[in-house]
Image: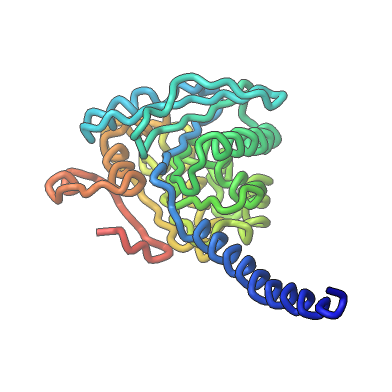
Amino acid sequence: MRRNWWRWLLLMVMIAVIFVPSVAWMHRRVAKYKTVYRTPLNPTILIPGSSASQNRFDELITELRKETKVVHSVLKVKVAENGQLSYTGSIRKGDNQPFIVIAFDNNHDGYSNINKQAAWLNIAFKDLVKTYHFNHFSALGHSNGGLIWTLFLEKYFAQTSRVDIDRLMTIATPYNMESASTTKRTDMLNELVKYREKLPAKLTVYSVAGTENYSSDGTVPANSVNQGKYVFQNHVAHYTQITVTGDQTTHSDLPQNKQIVLLIRQYLLQESIPAKDRAKQTVNRRALNGDPDLP
């Protein structure tokens, strides 16, 4: 038996030669599968603006359900200042395109507070991914909700691995806060520009502005919305500015504006919209990064 020890050693070496590369290959395959595989669950996550609750998008969601003839389920998440989460609603089994609304107990305006809300969004987002196991999604933010999304994408999104954001639509988002200047940047815009290199390179962004009087929607200056180009242009895959005119273009009306509802269906939900419906829109689209989806 002692004379045959080398045979056992040879056998162990042969097993190692075969087994170790096989395990390494399997790990590479699993990692590649996780990277390429896209979950059927593909939620649209919505964030309201300052002073708005988790019910801010109820009218929009009702309108989308009416237009799409699909009863998308709705899950609402409220984040307390201590990071505690409270859930209402649910995601219906088999609904792969639910709406998830994230709101904050402290929903006040202001530069420092919006930064806090981006950190609270990070807490909610991590919990949603852990609970529902999706690896891609689209996002919508109204007013300061768009700032919260942008700060989150720049500062926190990379913390959640193997999750992609496909599309982001911001509506009346004041990238330069309340300033109508085209030359002076607020602290918010300076921060967004400073960290824009962290934005997901494959992201498609639509920045929608409403113009009640061609310079403002009654609350947010159009020039402030347009400053988003300095944040996104050439730092994401596609960046498009869209201006909506006509009825329901005041700041608070924009989320349920029928033209914007159509834009959400077309660009976020990826519906096929008949040409006759698109023709009804009074919008000006400007693809600053060459969006292939624009008609």
At x 55%, y 23%, the residue is 51
| Figure quadrant of the N terminus | bottom right
Tally of numbered tags: 0
| Rendering quarter of residue 230 | bottom right
Up/down of 213 relative to 293, above or below: above
Which percent across, then down, holds residue 151? 62, 45
> Is residue 144 something one can see in this rendering?
no
> Is residue 166 something one can see in this rendering?
yes
| Rendering quarter of residue 25 | bottom right
Which percent across, then down, holds residue 147? 56, 42
Up/down of 18 relative to 78, above or below: below
Could you tell whether 186 is left or right of 201 in the image? right
| Figure quadrant of the C terminus | bottom left
Which percent across, then down, holds residue 179? 57, 42
At x 38%, y 66%, the residue is 290
Could you tell whether 277 is left or right of 290 in the image? left
Which colour scheme appears in the figure?
rainbow
Up/down of 21 relative to 45, above or below: below
Outermost residue, left side: 276
| Rendering quarter of residue 199 | bottom right
Which percent across, then down, holds residue 20? 68, 70
Could you tell whether 110 is left or right of 43 in the image? right
At x 47%, y 60%, the residue is 36
At x 74%, y 76%, the residue is 13
Q: Nearer the viewer, residue 229 or 87?
A: 87
Outermost residue, right side: 2
